[in-house]
């Protein structure tokens, strides 16, 4: 594992393997790059250069008390690309990792990007009269307190026991349980709150590189229709709903997600 230093002095750890088209894997809230192990293997086997980035306060990266907002996480991606000299990359983000990618695009546009893949992240978490595809139960009226105790159990979507069972394949591949951060740590709550307050729909609509929105049919966090609604705003975007999958589609249905990733990469000009 290698390290780069961000412009505000935070050390970010990453892995870098293989050659060919560079693909950067960015995990969601509390998750480390290890959670992409099943995608890493498939991408390497297909001849891609695969990089797994641990965001600040995630995985093996530094855990500072500052910079816990999506805009800074977007800048961190830029610092990472600058430090590694990567260009024409495909960014793949799961859950909050997708929001970090949209934050990058909001700041830097299509520079250095060849494509974007997001896995089960709604571009707007707050539900309202025109957007019913946010986090179950989250509205502008309870936004200030909704995540005080971390990510709540919505009681919706795929039963947790079934998703835990699917986690076994990832654990077997790694030989251990993947590294995870504390969802209730004081360093991470501000990030979760900032994440919840964002509305990336205008960013999604103006992304000028091919995009793929993947969603789990039975996501525990929000309706899967967020993916088709977001893709409909951009002529270069497509959506895929993964059946028999919850929020972590890359873990629940790794073969289907890998197939979609490889097909997307093969179709890039």
Image (cartoon, rainbow, N blue to C red):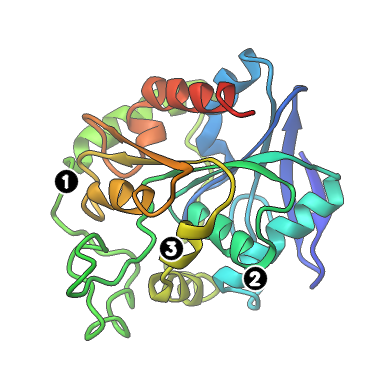
User: Which of the pair 104/252 is nearer the observer?
Assistant: 104
Looking at the picture, how far across and down is residue 102, in whole percent? 54, 59
| Left/right of residue 241 with respect to residue 53 in the rendered view | left
Residue furthest top in the image: 45
Q: Quadrant of the N terminus?
A: top right
* SS for dot 3: loop
| Left/right of residue 6 with respect to residue 261 in the rendered view | right
User: Which of the pair 103/237 is nearer the observer?
Assistant: 237
On residue 68, which mark appears? Answer: none
Instruction: Give neighbour class at mark 1: few <14, some 14-19, many 20+ (Cα, 10 Å).
Output: some
Looking at the picture, how far across and down is residue 152, in whole percent? 25, 64
Tell me which numbered mark, 3 or 1, is placed earlier along the sequence: 1
Tell me which numbered mark, 2 or 3, is placed earlier along the sequence: 2
Query: Which residue is under mark 3?
Result: 183
User: Which of the pair 138/31 is nearer the observer?
Assistant: 138
On residue 157, which mark appears? Answer: 1
| Left/right of residue 127 with respect to residue 4 in the rendered view | left
* SS for dot 2: helix
Question: Which residue is painted at 48% across and 52% down in the image?
Answer: 28
Tell me which numbered mark, 1 or 2, is placed earlier along the sequence: 2
Question: Which residue is painted at 23% across and 71% down in the image?
Answer: 127
Looking at the picture, how far across and down is residue 238, in whole percent? 40, 39
Instruction: Give neighbour class at mark 2: few <14, some 14-19, many 20+ (Cα, 10 Å).
Output: many
Query: Which residue is under mark 2?
Result: 72
Q: How much space separates mark 2 and mark 3, taking CA atoms? A: 19 Å
- Where, by quadrant of the figure, is residue 199 drawn? bottom left
Residue furthest left in the image: 155
């Amino acid at each position: 594992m290698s390290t780069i230093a961000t412009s505000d002095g935070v050390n970010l750890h990453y892995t870098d393997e293989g050659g060919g088209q560079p693909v950067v894997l960015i995990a969601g809230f509390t998750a480390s790059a290890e959670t992409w192990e099943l995608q890493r293997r498939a991408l390497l086997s297909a001849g891609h250069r695969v990089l797994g980035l641990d965001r600040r306060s995630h995985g093996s990266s530094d855990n500072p008390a500052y910079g816990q907002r999506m805009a800074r996480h977007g800048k961190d991606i830029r610092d990472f690309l600058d430090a590694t000299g990567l260009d024409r990359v495909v960014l793949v983000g799961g859950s909050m990792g997708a929001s970090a990618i949209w934050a990058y695009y909001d700041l830097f546009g299509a520079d250095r990007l060849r494509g974007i893949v997001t896995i089960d992240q709604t571009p707007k978490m707050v539900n309202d009269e025109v957007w019913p595809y946010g986090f179950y139960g989250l509205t502008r009226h309870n936004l200030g307190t909704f995540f005080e105790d971390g990510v709540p159990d919505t009681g919706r979507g795929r039963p947790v026991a079934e998703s835990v069972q699917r986690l076994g394949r990832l654990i077997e591949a790694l030989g251990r349980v993947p590294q995870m951060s504390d969802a209730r740590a004081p360093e991470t709550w501000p990030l979760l709150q900032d994440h919840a307050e964002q509305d990336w729909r205008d960013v999604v609509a103006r992304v000028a590189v091919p995009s793929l929105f993947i969603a789990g049919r039975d996501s525990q966090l929000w309706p899967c229709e967020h993916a088709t609604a977001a893709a409909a705003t951009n002529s270069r975007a497509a959506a895929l709903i993964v059946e028999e999958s919850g929020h972590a589609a890359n873990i629940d249905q790794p073969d289907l997600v890998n197939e979609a990733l490889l097909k997307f990469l093969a179709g890039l000009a």
